[in-house]
Amino acid sequence: MTTRSFFKGMTYGWGAGRGDYRQPYAVDSLRNLRETGSEWIALSFWTYQDHVYSTSIPFDYGYTMTDRDIAFAVKEAKALGLKVCLKPVVNSRDGIWRAHIGFPDDAMGVPYWDAWFKSYTNFICHYAELAEELGCEMFCIGCEMVKTESKSEYWRALIERVRSIYSGPIIYNGNHGKEEGISWFDAVDYIGTSAYYPVGKRPGDSVESMMEGWEEQKAKLAALSRKFGKPVVFMEIGCRSALGCATMPWDFLHKELPASEDEQANFYQSALQSFWDEPWFAGFFWWDWSTKLYALEEAGGNKGFDIYGKKAGDVLKQYYGGKLPVGV
């Protein structure tokens, strides 16, 4: 019997600026990440296009990670025994969510789509080449680009180009509730999604109640896996340690909410317990682990996505640490 491939992962590096990966605190952070039992990181970083209607994606020399930064982080991760999924992302400098990058769906929009996908393909292929050179074990070709996803001919051409450069498995990171709108999942190796499903019914909800919320999603995700013959991966999933965040796991704005390690821990427990042994499910990349961690004694008052020193970290160690067997 063959053990299925399963990602015990964590997102690392998001929000860091140029040079940050090479700081001593970032190296210490990676060591602490490894202690969760994680075997993978999604090394995730972004560059900007000026606004959601831009057709050009320039390299931002003031902010974006350099190839030297990325190479350093990959080397450090591999020295710790971690595998790496390289995950470059495009954000919009105007502050509008990247899901809205796109153009009108009429004949006048075609030149804009052509120009944007040419620039985006060049952007992605630069990092696909880097991923190949650095021996990254997986590559993510996009994240939550909802308005672009109907342009299947462009995406298929991009994937073909990536495969000519990068020899490992590739994944696309869709967004929760939008996965069924992607017709080209057959062209990638894994179906990825940002699984910020609002499984909590009320602030302070129980594990059992959240698991009921996950049951509502499982049938859809299992059907998606069957349709394309590909495993599903939660390329992003997480919840802040703040009261009520399991009802809106994507939230990062409501700073006024009181801290709640239990809310976050229950979200982790419910997701891990719900999906761990599903044969069509291939794992988690939790959101997220900062390059610069807070002091351990500050964990109880921290209301971010990080789980360092929090109850959710203990939950994850139970699963990632090998105390619970991965289904085969």
Image (tube, rainbow, N blue to C red):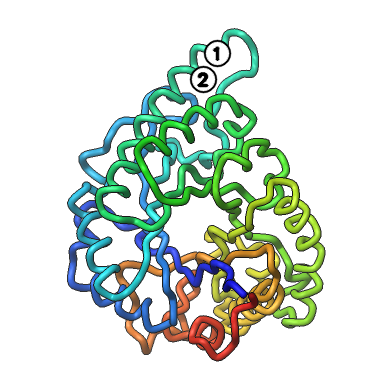
* Residue 281 spot, x, y in % from top left: 65, 64
**Are circles 1 and 2 on residues that touch, CB within 8 Å?**
yes
Q: Extreme front residue here?
A: 1
Identify the disc placed on residue 137. Answer: none
Q: Is residue 179 above or below residue 257?
A: above
The residue where tag 1 is placed is 110
Number of numbered labels in the structure image: 2
Q: Residues within 10 Å of mark 2 (few under 14, many from 20)?
A: many
| SS at circle 1 | helix
| 112 sits to left or right of 126 | right
Residue at 56 percent of width and 83 percent of height:
319
Residue 150, located in which quarter of the rendered image?
Answer: top right
Q: Is residue 6 above or below residue 177?
A: below
The residue where tag 2 is placed is 113
Q: Nearer the viewer, residue 54 or 40?
A: 40
- Asked whether residue 313 is in view, the answer is no
Give the position of the N terminus as an image quadrant: bottom right
Q: Residues within 10 Å of mark 1 (few under 14, many from 20)?
A: few
Residue at 61 percent of width and 84 percent of height:
262
Residue at 51 percent of width and 20 percent of height:
113
| 112 sits to left or right of 151 | left
Give the position of the C terminus as an image quadrant: bottom right
| SS at circle 2 | helix
The three-letter amino acid code for the residue at tag 2 is Trp
The three-letter amino acid code for the residue at tag 1 is Val
**How far is disc 1 from disc 2 in space, using C-alphas?**
5 Å
- Asked whether residue 85 is in view, the answer is yes
Residue at 43 percent of width and 86 percent of height:
309
* Residue 148 spot, x, y in % from top left: 57, 31
